Structure formats: C-alpha cells, structure tokens
Image (cartoon, rainbow, N blue to C red):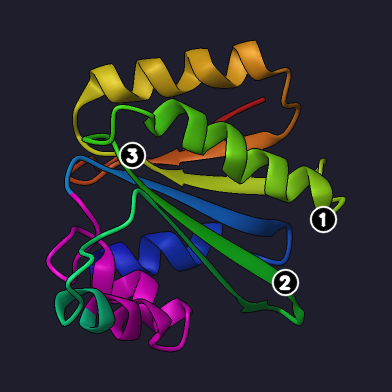
Amino acid sequence: MKNLDEILKNVGPQCHAILWISEETFSDSLPFFSELDYLFDGLLGLQAKHENNSEHGHGPFHYFSSKNFGNPLSLGHISSKNKNWKNCVIQFNQLQINKNELDECVLVILPKNSSIAKEFKEVIKKSAIKKMFKYFSPHSHDSIKSAV
C-alpha cells in the first residue's frame, strides 16, 4: 500500500484536514478510498454502503471527522463532476475556518487531471484562504508539493 504510506507521511500532527477531489462521484472504487477509509476507521465504507442502498444516490459533498494524534481530523470529498465543485471547496475551507484551524496544514488529494489542480489553486487564491496546502496526486513519484 504505497499510497497509504505516502499519505501517512503527510498526515502528521500538523495536518488537520484532507480535501479529496476526484473526477468521479463518491464510491468505494475511487483511488485512495481504502487508504482514507482506514484513516477514518471505516466511516467512508459505511457511507458508500449507505449510498449504494439509498434511492437518493450520492451527494455532491461528503464530510467526515476523526482524530489524528489526538487532534480533530476532517476529510472532505468533492467530485469535480459536480458543476458547483468550486463552491464546495470554499465550503470545506469555511468549515476549517470556523474550527479556528487557519494556520494548520491541509492535505489536498487531486486527480491526475492537471486542469483540476490548476482550477483548485485559482479558487484558493480568490478565496483569501491562508493555509499550508500539500498536494498529492496518484501515479506521481514526486507527488507531495507544498504551497501557501
């Protein structure tokens, strides 16, 4: 589980949130699903099972909470298929601001599609959010990059 090792290296005590943007809707077949489900004690698997059995389908934004080194750890999943995905990014960051975690690190997991990464960075610039972001993308040997 190379991806789990890479994620765990970057979800240390300074990391309070993970923002996971995928090209597909939330499901247990997404890249990093099993790794993140492990970090969040099976909560993602329970949600995926619930949504698969629900007539209402998948929501555009998913939010999970857990603990990391005794501190709160949040996970937000957003599908870029949702036409309002950029607004969901702002909502996720607003939740972090409300928790007074402004100067903590957020690990951002982006799809391989570089246009989404570029659009994400533009949303962050326009929103005046001042945090340390670490970017992680699948299939990249040098995938963790920091940015303020």
Q: Which quadrant would residue 113 be assigned to in this image?
A: top left
Q: Give the Cα separation between the discs numbered 1 and 3.
A: 23 Å
Task: Choose the circle earlier in sequence order: 2 or 3.
Answer: 2
- Is-magenta flag for residue 35? yes
Task: Please tell me which residue is depicted at 28% across the width and 35% down the height of the picture.
Answer: 82
**Residue type at mark 3?**
Leu
- Is-magenta flag for residue 19? no
Q: Which quadrant would residue 44 be assigned to in this image?
A: bottom left
Above-or-below relation of 132 to 139: above
Check whether the beta carbons of the residues at disc 1 and disc 3 lie within 8 A of each other: no
The residue labelled by disc 2 is: 72
Q: Secondary structure at mark 3?
A: loop
Task: Please tell me which residue is depicted at 66% across the width and 57% down the height of the picture.
Answer: 15
The residue labelled by disc 1 is: 99
Task: Choose the circle earlier in sequence order: 2 or 1.
Answer: 2
Counting other residues with Cα less than 10 Å from the Cα at mark 1, is it few (<14), some (14-19), or many (20 or more)?
A: few
2 left or right, relative to 73: left
**Residue type at mark 2?**
Pro
Check whether the beta carbons of the residues at disc 2 and disc 1 lie within 8 A of each other: yes
Numbered label attached to residue 110: 3
Residue 21 at what x, y percent from top left? 35, 43
